[in-house]
Image: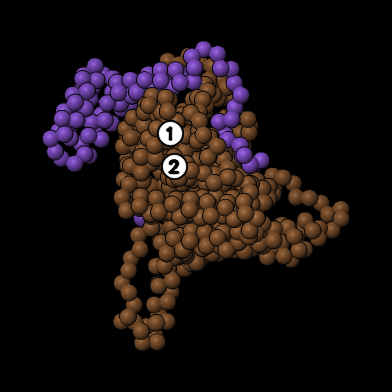
Chain colours: A purple, B brown
Amino acid sequence: MAEDFSSPVDIEGDEQGLSGLGLLAVAMGVALFVLAMLNAHALAAWADGLEPGARSARIGAVTHGLADATAARGLDSPRAALHDEWNQVKAARFAGQQDANQR
Amino acid sequence: MLFPTLDFGLFFLPVLILVWTVGQASNEWRKIILLLASWVFYGAWDWRFVLLLIASAAINWLLAARIQRRLDDGQGVQPWLAIGVVANLLILGFFKYFGFFLEELAPILVAAGFGRDLPVLEVILPVGISFFTFQGMSYLIDIARRKTQPASFLDITLLMSFFPHLVAGPIVRASHLVPQFQSVPRLTRTMVAGGLILITWGLFKKAVIASELATRLVDPAFFDPTAQTGPDLLAAAYGYAVQIYCDFSAYSDMAVGLAALMGYRFPRNFDQPYRAASLQDFWRRWHISLSSWLRDYLYISLGGNRGGIWYICRNLMLTMLLGGIWHGAKWTFLIWGALHGGVLAIERLWREFRPAGFPRLPTPIGVLLIFHIVVVGWIFFRAESLEAALTYLAQLVAFRPGVALAGPLMCGLIAVGMAFHFTPPGLFAGLTRRVAAWPAPLLGLAVGLAVLIIDAMRFEGVAAFIYYQF
């Protein structure tokens, strides 16, 4: 191996507890569950972009069903609130700043 | 298929499951799964390019075997090495530079009366061709230099096709990756934690910082500099420096992170480049896999540091000019390379002839100076043409008052993007060690929430990575 090879993931650490593979499997599972519950509309939007057909219609039905179910329980509101906050940050202007679209 | 999209996520998940289930039992099957996945990934752009990739791997595999045989027989390898380098350069040259030469040649041929004979040929540039042809060349040169052994056809094809690095690097050498292909890798907790942090961090840099800066500041400023004010043009120049760093380093971070989750180690490609106090130092921190490639296979082949100071300066200049042209057949890339080569040569001359006792530049001043030289280079790099770059610079110097594009968010993103360069160098390793000790559900929750926050902040849609075009 060449002398100057170093990888950002070459880090010595405590390897106690679940193995690396176990950590990956559980962490990915939880992350996917969190995203499926709090951001189901992203899946629905992705399904909307698929080429029309019987398969994409079935996928669309499932993803929209999930999005509707999570929205009915208010699970989509954290993401919506964050998005609104971010849009307010984007809309902020310096005093006296011209509008880029109206010059 | 772009990394920060759901398409890619839905592609990567089954691949990850397969490599750690089927691939856990058999390393050969693991590599076959990775190879097929890489072809699916690359074929999403254009299936024809997969054939080019396979052909390129086959040529390099055959030539490597031939070179090794001659080495074993004690014969010279230069003819076969030359054939290999020329074959790789021909592939690269045809797809990347043929159109440019035709375009430059057209006025001359038209003036000479051959205009009607000009072929109408539009060559589509295969994504990432510069990366995999450079990989092929370094493989052959390393074998000729006895730095690595010929790999099996499966290994060399996987090396060149492996999807995390395939389209925008890092340029991973055979001597680094092929030994990792020899057995099923072991996945450590720090690799998982580091991989997930890198992927999430890369997602933030690309989807939030780079995309926002590109769409709301940099693209409008470079589209028509004559319509912009001085502060906006200055902010857009700084903004592009941050954008290209966040864009390119995000790809590298995600590539390293994705490979880590599959058990492979890719080299570091960025190391806080804008904290460099000399241009030589900048190139030790920026696109490290390319700069070390240029050093090992071009600069040293040209003579490197041998032959006296003027030869060194010539070699620096030639290396950077060719590095510029590697990015594409445009005069702006040539000037970008010339600027870097010229400043590197001046730095070298200054080190050689600096009068004894002459005070050294304080480091903060050096950092500021080098950053601004790099920013000027980026203006040429980003501009559509030489004329557009010169117009941008002229408008910047004219400095018309007023601010329209550079609002609080843009200034904030530039400041954040610059601040990354001045964090403690051991921050990532320390964070990774801490996160690796977390319980798995907590790590999953943190990753899920981080991705949710990024998704709430991201620009609608994702633009291709800047380095996809190279």
Residue B112, position as x, y percentages in the image: 40, 87
**Residue on which disc 2 sits:** B154
The three-letter code of the residue at mark 1 reads Glu
Instruction: Locate the C terminus of chain B by quadrant.
Output: bottom left
Q: Is residue A84 left or right of residue B179?
A: left
Q: Earlier in the sequence, mark 2 or mark 1?
A: 1
Residue B199 position in % (x across, y down) = 45, 33
- Dot 1 falls on which chain? B
Quadrant of the frame with the N terminus of chain B: top left
Residue at mark 1:
B28
Name the residue furthest top.
Answer: A17
Tell me the chain of label 2.
B
Which of B394 and B349 lies nearest the eye of the viewer? B349
What's the amino acid at mark 2?
Leu
Residue A85 visible to the viewer = no
Find the residue positioned furthest to the front. B73
Q: Does B436 sit left or right of B458 as displayed?
A: right
Residue B343 at what x, y percent from top left?
Answer: 66, 59
**SS assignment at label 2:** helix
Please tell me which residue lies in front, A15 or B335: A15
- The residue under the point 51% across, 55% down is B63
- The image quadrant of residue A10 is top right
Residue B163 visible in the snapshot: yes
Q: Which residue is pictured at 31% across the width and 45% down the height?
A: B44
Q: CA distance from mark 2 to mark 1?
A: 9 Å
